[in-house]
Amino acid sequence: MNYRVIFNTVGRIALVLATLLTIPTLLAACLAESSWWALLTTVGISLAIGLTLTFAVRPKTKAIFSKEGLIIVALSWIYVSAIGALPFVISGAIPNYIDAFFETCSGFSTTGATILTGTKIDAMYITDKALLFWRSFTHWIGGMGVIVFLMAFESGSSNRGMHVLRAEMPGPEVDKIVPRARSTAQILYLLYIGFTAVEIVALLIAGMPVFDSFVHAFGTAGTGGFGVRSDSIASYGAACQWIITVFMVLFGVNFNLYYLWILGKIKSAVKSQELWIFIVIIAVSTSIVSVDLSLANLSFADNAGDAIRHAAFQVASFISTTGYSSIPTIAGDINVFPLLSKGLLFLLMFIGGCAGSTGGGLKVSRVALLCLAVRKELRHVLHPRNANAVKFDGKTVSDEMLNGVARYFGLYMLILAGAFIVLCFDSGSGLTVEANITAAVSCVNNIGPAYGVVAGGYYMYNWFSKLTLSFAMLIGRLEIYPILLTVAPSTWIRR
């Protein structure tokens, strides 16, 4: 294994993090906020680590294979989460490091789970806008990926970087848009920046303040969901909510399809089975939740228009794994939704967005392949001599691919069960089985909101539960294998 290229790449990531941290640092200085020195100190720390690893650990060869790619991704994400938490600790905004680590893991993994209370968020909106900016900016960085960012904008990126790209981009399979990994990364980021800019402009036109427009666009683009007000998106009005709803769906779509549309290959894009499954699930779920809300006579959905708006918003929020809420604080939180709607939204937590999107969850394509594999087995039982080939998106799916999806799902369920059991040892105030299972599902699938007392935040959990959920978020974002391979002792033993 090429240890030098691993740590040298992590060093370059440290330099990237230091560069990105200068943006909220400058914002804090311009706003005359006291957090500027905490942000600047973190810039210095990351810069020192980055320079040391970059120049002291020079690789003899830049070859990156699958194993190195997985480890580079895992270590880089652990690093940015660990160092990215320092501004909150140094400034005193989140004095406990594990709480800050949880918040930053939630940010970079685009989960949106928070240990901050609504009162604390409202207070920071007045006094610590730069820290709230950094908090939401981590969503935007993590949405497309920190390694993808490095590959897109650093001229010295390895041509063997497709192994890294595949390790970081979510979904059962990541296709090359163009032959070179760096060019693929550049195209992805240009699309990402373009969509983000369009959303910012749309929110500004709809009347959202400038600062709020930026941070909410960051949260939507990364499908993260950190808000800057205690009621999330509820107080911004119907126009802003509809804009965010549309963009949550757009960012849940495979970015490769957008590239095909730009090239004029619209027919190829619209033939995507995954895209149509995604659209149908959203349409059916929105219809069911709309009717359910109307029948429930909730104060914020007392007419058909409001019921459809809130239903569409929450369905898009859950399936894209963004986690924003349109429910007014005076009405409560997600717990006020009727049982059928809550059950349906809970199922959407598992599905998530499309492969190659910024969304979390199992991914639509992986769920579809699992269903096709089950159908194949049932057909094999009924007609054992038939070939029963599985096709998806016009391609024959190999048995190796189906077995890989099945193995991934098995690991996914084990991790989910393990996280849930750990949470059940916690004796935090008001915690129930419903709260713990939805918290585990939410963090592993990078969604954020949960049911029960956790709907108001994760602050009631103890330090060990928060640490467990932090790594659950990273495992979910990186789709299991990079983190598991990195923590396995056999990975680091020279043979």
Image: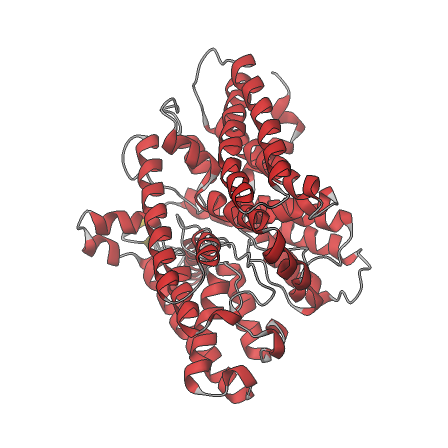
Query: Residue 493: percent from the left, percent from the top?
Result: 64, 20
| Residue farthest toward the left in the current orientation of the protein | 264
Q: Closest to the observer: 303 or 378?
A: 303
Position of 48 relative to 30 (above/below): above
Relative placement, left or right, of 345 versus 100 is left
**Residue 55 visible in this rendered orientation of the protein:** yes
Tell me which residue sits at (44%, 53%) in the image: 214
Look at the image and tell me in which quarter the C terminus lies. Answer: top right
Position of 398 relative to 7 (above/below): below
Numbered circles on residues, count: 0
Identify the image's colour scheme: rainbow, by chain, secondary structure or one colour. secondary structure
Query: Residue 232: percent from the left, percent from the top?
Result: 55, 65
Query: Residue 74: percent from the left, percent from the top?
Result: 56, 35
Q: Closest to the observer: 471 or 392?
A: 471
Relative placement, left or right, of 441 versus 70 is right
**Residue 485 visible in this rendered orientation of the protein:** no
Position of 90 relative to 242 (above/below): above
Tell me which residue sits at (39%, 27%) in the image: 154
Tell me which residue sits at (26%, 47%) in the image: 259
Query: Residue 445: percent from the left, percent from the top?
Result: 55, 54
Q: Closest to the observer: 178 or 173?
A: 178
Picture quadrant where residue 187 is located: top left
| Residue farthest toward the right in the current orientation of the protein | 427
Tell me which residue sits at (43%, 31%) in the image: 150
